[in-house]
């Protein structure tokens, strides 16, 4: 029976540790109203990227403009009273020196001057507070990032207390990804000289590369036996969004091993195996598998240099069946290996 074979040889294989992770913004901020009032306008498109300081909502300004006018008028009144108190104190000062008036009369004038100065300072602070409240009617983005869904619609009444949430802004460049590794996997990482991180999509293709670990928990979760990790990635094109589940892959070094097509590995009651050609006949070979390497499967033990691994017609093979091996087309060079069917879930 004709079969296609791949001649395998031991070679250095980059091996990684992989886990399911969840993305989060490197900064995630709740945008809240700092003053109470009616929302006149929503000034942004939900889900769009905005820069820090960009206007998001406009709260009704009129009540705060009136309050500012009142504060300024009160300030002007207090300034006039201060000038009057200052003139009165200046007028009485020489009379007091000449003892032409009672000392108490001059003391009262000085006290009135001090009270007027304090009243002006208080009125000035009230003006500043009114100016701030007026500026707060334009709700702006506190950071550069992607906006969330609006929690209040135009015309809604918003309060500056517990009912103040308007939307959220998440900084997505850089973006963080949280995941967890077992103690053994973490030990493999620590043996590596450097740790390169990348994110894989559902099809196994890289979504983001060039990531770096920026956090490792100092304790092990006693329930799961895992350690929380976090990686940071540049994300200028929004390839990954906060809340998205991804496969985080960390390069942990290299190992000498064989590579065979994933389709050539079969699962039996005794474990995984491949078919090889021995003396022109098919023979089963139990193997110890490692991670996936794109379309290949890494094999640690069970094969030898020069073995011909059968890659097709597997269901028709029987031990000792005569076969006519045909060489397979060379497989393309692959990227770092991924842990095969196992992935540690991030908490």
Image: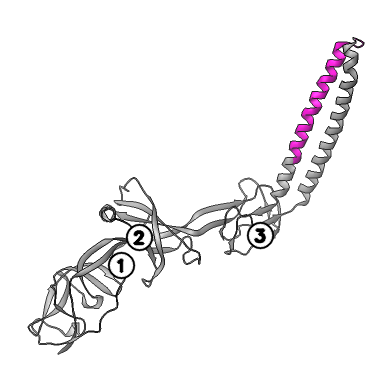
Is there a contact, CB below 8 Å, between mark 2 and mark 3? no
Span colored in magenta: 99-127
Graded by Cα atoms within 10 Å as few (under 14), some (14 to 19) or many (20 or more), the crowding at tag 2 reads some
Is there a contact, CB below 8 Å, between mark 2 and mark 1? yes
Q: Earlier in the sequence, mark 2 or mark 1?
A: 2
Q: Nearer the viewer, residue 314 or 288?
A: 288
Graded by Cα atoms within 10 Å as few (under 14), some (14 to 19) or many (20 or more), the crowding at tag 1 reads many
Q: Earlier in the sequence, mark 3 or mark 1?
A: 3
Dot 2 corresponds to which residue?
196
Dot 3 corresponds to which residue?
153
Quadrant in the rendering for residue 145: bottom right
Q: Percent from the top left, x then y, of residue 236?
A: 50, 64
Dot 1 corresponds to which residue?
336
Rendered view: 337 above or below 225: below
- The N terminus lies in quadrant: bottom left
Q: Is residue 176 left or right of residue 224?
A: right
């Amino acid at each position: 029976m004709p079969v296609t074979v791949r001649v395998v040889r031991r070679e250095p294989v980059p091996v990684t540790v992989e886990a399911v992770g969840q993305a989060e913004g490197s900064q995630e901020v709740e945008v809240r109203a700092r003053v109470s009032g009616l929302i006149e306008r929503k000034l942004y498109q939900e889900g769009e990227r905005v820069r820090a300081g960009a206007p998001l909502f406009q709260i009704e300004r009129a009540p705060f403009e009136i309050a500012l006018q009142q504060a300024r008028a009160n300030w002007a009144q207090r300034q006039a009273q201060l000038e009057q108190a200052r003139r009165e104190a200046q007028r009485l000062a020489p009379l007091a020196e000449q003892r032409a008036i009672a000392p108490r009369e001059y003391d009262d004038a000085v006290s009135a001057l001090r009270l007027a100065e304090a009243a002006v300072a208080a009125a000035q602070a009230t003006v500043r507070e009114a100016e701030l409240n007026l500026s707060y009617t334009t709700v702006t983005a506190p950071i550069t990032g992607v906006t969330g869904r609006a929690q209040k619609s135009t015309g809604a009444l918003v309060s500056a207390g517990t009912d103040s949430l308007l939307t959220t802004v998440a900084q997505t460049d850089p973006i963080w990804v949280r995941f967890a590794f077992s103690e053994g996997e973490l030990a493999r990482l620590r043996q590596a000289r450097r740790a390169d991180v990348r994110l894989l999509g559902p099809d196994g293709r890289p979504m983001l590369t060039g990531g770096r670990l920026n956090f490792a928990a100092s304790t092990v979760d006693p329930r799961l036996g895992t350690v929380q990790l976090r990686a940071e990635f540049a994300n200028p094109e929004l390839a990954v969004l906060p809340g998205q589940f991804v496969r985080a892959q960390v390069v942990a070094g290299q190992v000498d091993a064989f590579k065979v097509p994933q389709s050539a590995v079969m699962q039996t009651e005794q474990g995984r195996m491949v078919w090889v050609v021995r003396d022109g006949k098919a023979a089963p070979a139990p193997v110890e598998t490692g991670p996936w390497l794109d379309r290949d499967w890494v094999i640690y033990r069970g094969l030898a240099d020069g073995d011909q691994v059968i890659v097709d017609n597997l269901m028709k093979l029987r031990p000792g069946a005569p076969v006519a091996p045909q060489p397979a087309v060379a497989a393309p060079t692959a990227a770092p290996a991924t842990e095969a069917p196992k992935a540690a879930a991030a908490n």
